[in-house]
Amino acid sequence: MHTSLHIEKYPTLSWRKFYFYCLLLALASASNTAHDSGPQSSKDTREASEAETCTQNQSPTTRIDQAILADDGFIPDQEAVKRMQTSCGLFLAQSTIPHAGLGLFVGRRLPRGAPVGPADIIIQITDPNPIHGDGMHILVQDYAWDGQETGGQYEGKVVYSVIPGVGSLSNGLKTYSNVLPFGVEVDEANLPRTTAPGSGAISHYHNYSYFANKAVDAGGELFVNYGGSWFEERERKGRLLHTKEDEVLASQTRSIDWLREFGICADNLHVEQSTTEGAGRGAFSSRFIPRGAIIAPAPVIQITKRESLYTLLVKADETKEDVVQGKQLFLNYMLGHHNSSILFYPNAPIVNLINHDAKNANAVLRWSNWTQHKGRDWPTSMSVDEIRSLDSTGLMLEYVATKDIIPGEEVFLNYGSDWQTAWENHVQSWTAPPFSEEYTPSYIMDDVASTIRTLKEQTQHPYPENIITSCFYSYRNNKGKEAATGSVESKSETTAVQWKLTRGLFELRNLRPCAILNRDTSKDGKHMLYTVQILNRYGMVDGDRIPRGNVHIVTKVPRQAIRFSDKIYTSDQHLPKVFRHEIGIPDEIFPPQWMDRA
């Protein structure tokens, strides 16, 4: 996915001779050839040694040590790679913020309101393990989002949302952002719990999109709004790697030529329904990808304890052993090896939807040797204990095409024999969970129920047991505006306020349980308006919670402000005996010193 070598300084050398010339220089100056950072901006013109020039002038797909597939030594077609890079709309490259690591850049100008990158899934992590949850500390402290931001608040008491791609790879500035998230869709991807062994094995949250909230020039870096508390917490703990001065120095733009030469394309894939029956959604090529080229870069987040993905551990009195009660859905998106306690989450657009096919796989994994990420030598230089002790990420894998992949073709990876055996055993023993026929997903209810039943009506015609009603409402913004109806002597108080549309009200964090008390017709007779009682839920901060004993009534709530929601722990990812297994990293590339379970 990178253009051909620039060898103007060495006009008499073929690219093969140039490579060996660079190799000799590298051997002669091994101690000086490792560079963890690229240019600080597109205008950077710093001098480099000849050995540095060799490294900088090689793009990942043109380096022989990275282009080898199996034993055939295949080099991708450079003209095809150049065409890929020219059409690329999203690049992974070193951030323009000093000390901020990698960032995402756009390959063409984005007008305000334009979509940014491919829409992706969200993975909800629920109620982290209280004993071993520290194994996910890097993910939680640096990459995960509050589950309320993505509508995942009903999945558990404590919910973190993992948003791959734009949501996790984009950097943040205190005072500036140029992209905003917009909505999420929720459905089972044709894997109903009544008939599909794969029910509960995939995330229902998908098509999570980002849009430019202001025009972004070609080569511009993407910045998401992390929220002020993110920066405050890191400053308090001394973990903010870049300073206010660094943010001022950030150019926020790189040249397109530089990105096409040294960046890695991150939008080669998009989502469609998989061609594999029972697999749900899949990853499909958005452009021609020649054999040997990088399909997608995948910076990985290390999970240092497998046990951190166990949803509950119970200490047995007699044996004193931990009993596994369940595993997080997140495990199904992990990469790992059965002989290692460490797992790796591939944090890149769409790669989490690359499905398994042992016979027809057209992609393989390899460790990246790209010069712009700091952990390129970790697989050979670090022990498993050193990986565990890290407080940041740095490792990176690449998905590489093993054959030419045409536009619209699904991308498959061989997950390995361990995964294959586990899946076959699961399918053979699978039966539909109890009461599956009585379950109705909340998104189906929203599609079919134009009128909401009141509590009184629900006593005669109840909704499915898993369903509750929720309202978009901000108690924080309405405190002090209520009409109080309680007495001074009463320990409780009833307050009432009329529903009003305000900016940001339909953000998913404002979705909370509500009981439907009454239904009326609007004055023009065209709409239904509801009177509701606003209720609390898990995860709400004090300012948003209705005080204990208080009854808070809201009138004239429109139908579009009411949704059906699945009760906590009733969605498919919480089903008993669902399939859980990590994706296998091949033996031949997994570092032997990390096999601490062998």
Image (cartoon, grey):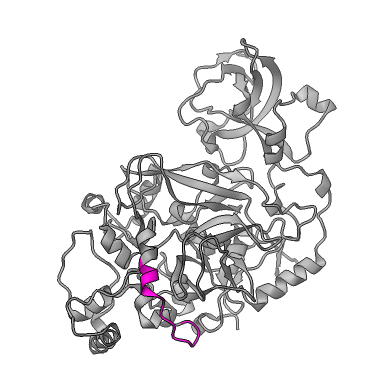
Image-based side of 335 in relation to 244, left or right = right
Farthest top residue in view = 523
Q: Is residue 74 magenta?
A: yes
Residue in the picture at 54% in, 34% down = 510
Image-based side of 147 in relation to 576, left or right = left
Q: Nearer the viewer, residue 438 or 495?
A: 438
Image location (x, y in percent) of residue 361: 59, 73
Q: Nearer the viewer, residue 92 or 460?
A: 92
Q: Is residue 335 magenta?
A: no
213 w.r.t. 247: above or below: above
User: Is the N terminus in the top left, top right, bottom left or bottom right quadrant?
Assistant: bottom left
Q: Nearer the viewer, residue 342 or 350?
A: 350
Q: Nearer the viewer, residue 511 or 310?
A: 511
Residue 490: image quadrant is: top right
Residue in the picture at 59% in, 17% down = 496
Name the dominant secondary structure of the magenta segment. Answer: loop
How many marks the image carries: the answer is 0
439 w.r.t. 533: above or below: below
User: Is the C terminus in the top left, top right, bottom left or bottom right quadrant?
Assistant: bottom right
Image-based side of 106 in relation to 291, left or right = left
250 w.r.t. 178: above or below: below
424 w.r.t. 505: above or below: below
Residue 581: image quadrant is: bottom right
Image location (x, y in percent) of residue 191: 72, 54
Image location (x, y in percent) of residue 4: 31, 73
**Can residue 225 be seen from the camera position used here?**
yes
**Can residue 370 be seen from the camera position used here?**
no
Image location (x, y in percent) of residue 408: 54, 60
The residue range painted magenta reads: 69-82
